[in-house]
């Protein structure tokens, strides 16, 4: 048991943090008041510096990939990371990225499709991939703060991937959990800043216990989620993966509500980035069937059938 | 980063389990039902702890000078997990091992060390902590029990309440306010008071935890020598804060809660009820609470094992532990209510009586939330 990064992981983490502190990762209102901005610049920098390959590096490993997903999801800009950092190195290392993932119905809108160059289709029995060409994707209007698109299924050629489909789904549970936990953490950080600054009744909002206790509960859940995610990334055990996702999805609704309550009307405007995190969280909390389904998988993995 | 146990740690855990299965009598679950502060458990711990001491498993993390073996932090922690999972057969003595002994080593006079530490290391000492008062619970620093200096003595007057183990204790680790030493925390000093000293009256308060666990302790003109003071006047609050810093993750309650949850699931399967998706969901949620608590506690213990003392991370962990213990207890009462009456299930009842304390004993959950908000999230204090 050693819950600290090794030397290489520390270096990776420090370098990553420096990159993510850059201006290109910051919030600026999107043109036409769109609800999202894709972080093209940081995406390219991360790819050029090999960050998405961390999982395949012996001294970094999937733990670092999960940590990176968690950190990148804290940015106000959206960057496709979970599939590139956790799935791609495992069974599709040549796949061009960004990558969109079909985790349920292929005809539904899928996040990151508008900028994706390939798709991974996960199901219980197999894993397929397809390279995207111009015209394969139609951009979809959305409430969620992700670029969403719909696939023209008829135009695609699918390749079967020789990998364990169940394991791929477990990895994806970990990836989604890390992205969701990161989105909540990003939102929490912005609300913390706000409640320290904003005064009402002659004192900072954050000095009220009604606010303090709910934020404290929130950070306890997010921190524990992060640890459970990192543990699952290392063990890749089905129970650990389901638990990490279930625990994260289970808390997302309440935390999302609290964050908006404490940001008040400012959080309802597109001039403040809170929606970037909470509307990503709203989508991710229902991914792969949502918390109930993930808890069900955990119960199956831990206790077996009835 | 590595979430797996080392071979040494795994072997140590098996060794502890081996000793427990050898030394705990068959009627231990029934005995443990009486509650951690009961006469029955206390008498048992006075037989059991010397055996642990003999096996080198009572104070393995202590310095050799005081009977320990300077074993690593993780071993001490694994020991705590296994003892709690077994129903804490060390009874009140877990406090000696975890913090009273180490505090005496750090702050005690030579005479105090010689007098009390060997007894603790031998597994033969029962202490209680005289902290809370009728008007000083969460706001402990407002305590009013007085220590008046008269020549070579202090005269103690006041009242403590909700004191665990007081009925059977040999010594009280007492916090009192020294008259004439100023106001607030700076006037608080620690006294080691033998419970047989004239003027001490102990009254047991019937409680939900089990008989003999909560007491009132009255101090009326209790004369103790100045040499019974631990550290200097004005140092008391600092000592107690340092002592409790070791304790802030609290008891590894998720360990017993996890075992109880598995027992509950086993019983629900036998009854043909575990196919119910609502029950499966609730069981999984309770398990998730336990695993969340476990990993947050491990984070704090791991930092300590590397020589770091984390701040409010320990309070974060402690709050998660509270949630875990209640989640399992609530799950049992919601789906196995019949097990808490009649012949019932001794282990579920014992667990509930331990869980009901969680979030109140040793610092209310709401105070922990204040600490997390102010020291972990750096939110401003209330004006």
Image (cartoon, coloured by chain):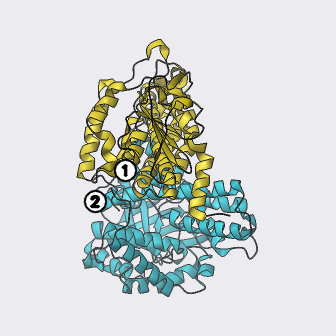
Tell me: residue A146, above or below residue B24.
Answer: above
Q: Position of residue B336 (x, y in %)?
A: 72, 64
Please give left or right for residue A26 compared with residue B322 in the image: left
Numbered disc in front, either 2 or 1: 1
Residue occupying the far top of the picture: A32
The residue located at (51%, 34%) in the rendering is A208
Crowdedness of circle 2 by 10 Å Cα count: few (<14), some, many (20+)? few
* Vertical relation: A143 (above or below) A74: above
Q: Percent x, y for residue A202? A: 48, 24
Chain assignment, label 2: B
Between A119 and A269, the residue placed more toward the observer is A119
| Tag 2 near tag 1, CB within 8 Å | no
**Placement of the N terminus of chain A among the 4 image quadrants:** bottom left
Left or right: A255, with B271 as reference point: left
Residue A250 seen in render: yes
Chain for colour cyan? B
Q: CA gap, disc 2 to disc 1? A: 24 Å
Quarter of the picture containing the C terminus of chain A is bottom right
Query: Dot 2 corresponds to which residue?
Result: B306
In the picture of the structure, the residue carrying the numbered disc 1 is: A62
Marks 2 and 1: same chain? no
Q: Residue at x 39, y 49 (%)?
A: A90
- Which element carries disc 2, helix, strand or loop? loop
Q: Which quarter of the picture shows residue A14?
A: top left
Q: Residue B58 at x, y = what percent?
A: 39, 78
Who's yellow, chain-wise?
A
Circle number at residue B18 = none
């Amino acid at each position: 048991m050693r819950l600290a990064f090794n030397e290489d992981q520390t270096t990776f983490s420090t370098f990553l943090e420096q990159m993510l502190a850059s201006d290109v990762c910051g919030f600026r209102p999107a043109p036409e008041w769109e609800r999202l901005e894709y972080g093209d610049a940081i995406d390219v920098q991360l790819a050029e510096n090999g960050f998405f390959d961390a999982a395949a590096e012996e001294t970094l490993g999937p733990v670092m990939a999960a940590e990176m997903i968690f950190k990148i999801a804290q940015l106000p800009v959206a960057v496709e990371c979970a599939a590139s950092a956790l799935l791609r190195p495992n069974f599709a290392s040549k796949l061009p990225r960004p990558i969109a993932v079909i985790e349920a119905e292929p005809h539904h809108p899928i996040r990151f499709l508008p900028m994706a160059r390939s798709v991974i289709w996960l199901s219980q029995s197999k894993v397929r991939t397809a390279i995207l060409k111009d015209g394969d994707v139609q951009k979809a209007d959305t409430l969620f703060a992700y670029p969403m698109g719909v696939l023209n299924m008829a135009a695609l050629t699918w390749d079967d991937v020789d990998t364990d489909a169940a394991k791929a789904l477990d990895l994806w549970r970990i990836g989604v959990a890390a992205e969701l936990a990161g989105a909540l953490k990003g939102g929490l950080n912005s609300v913390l800043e706000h409640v320290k600054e904003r005064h009402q009744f002659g004192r900072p909002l954050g000095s009220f216990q009604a606010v303090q206790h709910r934020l404290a509960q929130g950070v306890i859940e997010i921190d524990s989620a992060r640890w459970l995610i990192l543990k699952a990334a290392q063990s890749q055990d089905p129970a650990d993966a389901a638990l990490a996702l279930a625990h994260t999805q289970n808390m997302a609704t309440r935390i999302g509500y609290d964050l908006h309550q404490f940001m008040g009307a400012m959080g309802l405007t597109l001039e403040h980035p809170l929606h970037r995190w909470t509307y990503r969280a709203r989508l991710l909390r229902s991914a792969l069937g949502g918390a109930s389904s993930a808890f069900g998988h955990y119960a199956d993995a831990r206790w077996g059938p009835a | 980063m590595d979430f797996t146990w080392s071979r040494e740690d795994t072997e140590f855990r098996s060794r502890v389990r081996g000793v427990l299965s050898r030394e705990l009598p068959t009627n231990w679950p029934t005995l443990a039902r009486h509650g951690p502060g009961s006469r029955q458990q206390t008498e048992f711990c006075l037989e059991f702890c010397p055996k642990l001491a003999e096996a080198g498993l009572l104070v393995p993390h202590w310095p050799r000078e005081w009977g320990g073996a300077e074993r690593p932090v993780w071993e001490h922690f694994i020991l705590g997990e296994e003892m709690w999972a077994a129903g804490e057969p060390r009874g009140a003595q877990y406090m000696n091992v975890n913090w009273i002994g180490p505090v005496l080593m750090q702050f005690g006079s030579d005479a105090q060390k010689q007098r009390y530490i060997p007894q603790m290391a031998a597994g033969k000492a029962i202490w209680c902590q005289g902290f809370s008062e009728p008007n000083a619970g969460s706001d402990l620093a407002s305590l009013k029990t007085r220590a008046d200096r008269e020549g070579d003595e202090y005269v103690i007057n006041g009242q403590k309440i909700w004191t665990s183990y007081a009925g059977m204790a040999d010594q009280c680790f007492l916090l009192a306010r020294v008259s004439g030493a100023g106001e607030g925390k700076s006037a608080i000093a620690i006294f080691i008071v033998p419970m047989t000293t004239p003027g001490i009256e102990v009254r047991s308060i019937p409680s939900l935890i089990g008989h003999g666990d909560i007491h009132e302790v009255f101090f009326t003109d209790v004369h103790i020598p100045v040499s019974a003071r631990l550290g200097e006047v004005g140092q008391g609050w600092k000592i107690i804060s340092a002592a409790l810093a070791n304790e802030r993750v609290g008891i590894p309650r998720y360990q017993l809660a996890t075992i109880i949850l598995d027992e509950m699931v086993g019983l629900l399967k036998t009854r043909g009820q575990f196919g119910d998706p609502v029950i499966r969901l609730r069981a999984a949620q309770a398990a998730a609470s336990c695993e969340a608590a476990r990993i947050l506690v491990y984070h704090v213990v791991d930092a300590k094992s590397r020589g770091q003392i984390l701040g409010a991370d320990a309070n974060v962990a402690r709050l998660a532990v509270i949630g875990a213990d209640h989640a399992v207890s609530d799950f049992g009462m919601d789906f196995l209510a019949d097990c808490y009456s009649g012949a019932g299930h001794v282990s579920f009842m014992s667990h509930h009586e331990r869980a009901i304390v969680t979030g109140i004993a040793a610092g209310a959950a709401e105070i922990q939330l204040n600490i997390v908000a102010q020291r972990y999230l750096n939110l401003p204090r209330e004006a």
